[in-house]
Amino acid sequence: MEPINSPAFRASNQSVHFDIVQFLGLPFASVSRQQAIACIRHAATQPTWSYVVTPNAAHLARIGHRNCEIRRIYESARYCFLDSRVVFRVAKLFGLAPPPVITGADLVAALFAEVICPATSICIVGGSNQLIDRLQRIFHVGQVFHLNPRMGFWQDSQQIDQAARFVIRSQADITFLVVGSPQQEILANRVLELGGARGVGVCVGASLEFITGIRKRAPRAIQRLSLEWAFRLCLEPRRMAHRYFIESPQGIGLVLREAFKKQLG
């Protein structure tokens, strides 16, 4: 594999053209997983900052019901990939045309398998020292800039600016934002607003913990049945209950409302 900063990598790394699918008011990229990887690989070489969001059902509920500012932040992302097989299936069932599913966990696993190498500079905001140690040991990543901000940092303008400036100073090829949603998306957008960063930021939640074994991901068969949410709920009932019993059903409700509007219209 050519290092991400090598001339050969840059020469072979062409921009990927893709269609946009408007779904629930957001501009989703209609791409395959390999195209999504190519998009991020290209963005990692760029002199300006862009970021990737992967909304699931809970994120869609948050965007649709409560906060216009959060919607603007998702709309400002360079790439928006749908991270919910349940949303996809319900939408198809009721006659909508959702974008392809590109889960954040699959995206991150593919990045480490196909793109990231020891020459890739990485910035990680969030996660423990154990996570960083495992990434370096398992994937032999070289230069890693790591910041683990305080809980609630995103609600303090000074603290979020400090985190954003850390990303800017790193000048990393790929930045992984793993501080949960919506704080990781808010941070990604703040980096964009401040200017001076380069490469690409990827809002990925627990994905780095999956590939390092800190958390267990559902087996492929369960994923294909769209039951990964149930697997995570069984493993972490207290942590995941609000997402899957309160927020995610609201996200599914938005899909049903959209289908109802289509039938009326």
Image: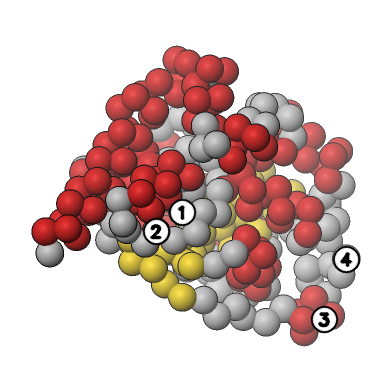
The type of colouring in the image is secondary structure
Q: Position of residue 124 (x, y in %)?
A: 63, 46
As measured in the structure, the alpha-carbon distance from the residue carrying label 2 to the one carrying label 3 is 37 Å
Q: Earlier in the sequence, mark 4 or mark 2?
A: 4
Is residue 148 visible in the rendered image? The answer is no
Secondary structure state at the residue bearing disc 1:
loop
Secondary structure state at the residue bearing disc 3:
helix
Point out the frontmost of discs 2 and 3: 2
Q: What residue appears at the point 82 percent right and 50 percent down from the top-left corner?
A: 141
Q: What residue appears at the point 80 percent right and 76 percent down from the top-left corner?
A: 9
Q: Residues within 10 Å of mark 4 (few under 14, many from 20)?
A: few
Q: Mark 4 belongs to which amino acid?
A: Met
Point out the frontmost of discs 4 and 2: 2
Q: Mark 3 belongs to which amino acid?
A: Pro
Is residue 118 visible in the rendered image? The answer is yes
Q: Residues within 10 Å of mark 3 (few under 14, many from 20)?
A: few
Q: Mark 2 belongs to which amino acid?
A: Pro
As measured in the structure, the alpha-carbon distance from the residue carrying label 4 to the one carrying label 1 is 29 Å
Q: Which residue is mark 4?
A: 1
Q: What residue appears at the point 21 percent right and 44 percent down from the top-left corner?
A: 65
Q: Residues within 10 Å of mark 2 (few under 14, many from 20)?
A: many
As measured in the structure, the alpha-carbon distance from the residue carrying label 1 to the one carrying label 3 is 32 Å
Q: Which residue is mark 1?
A: 82
Secondary structure state at the residue bearing disc 2:
loop
Q: Which residue is mark 3?
A: 7
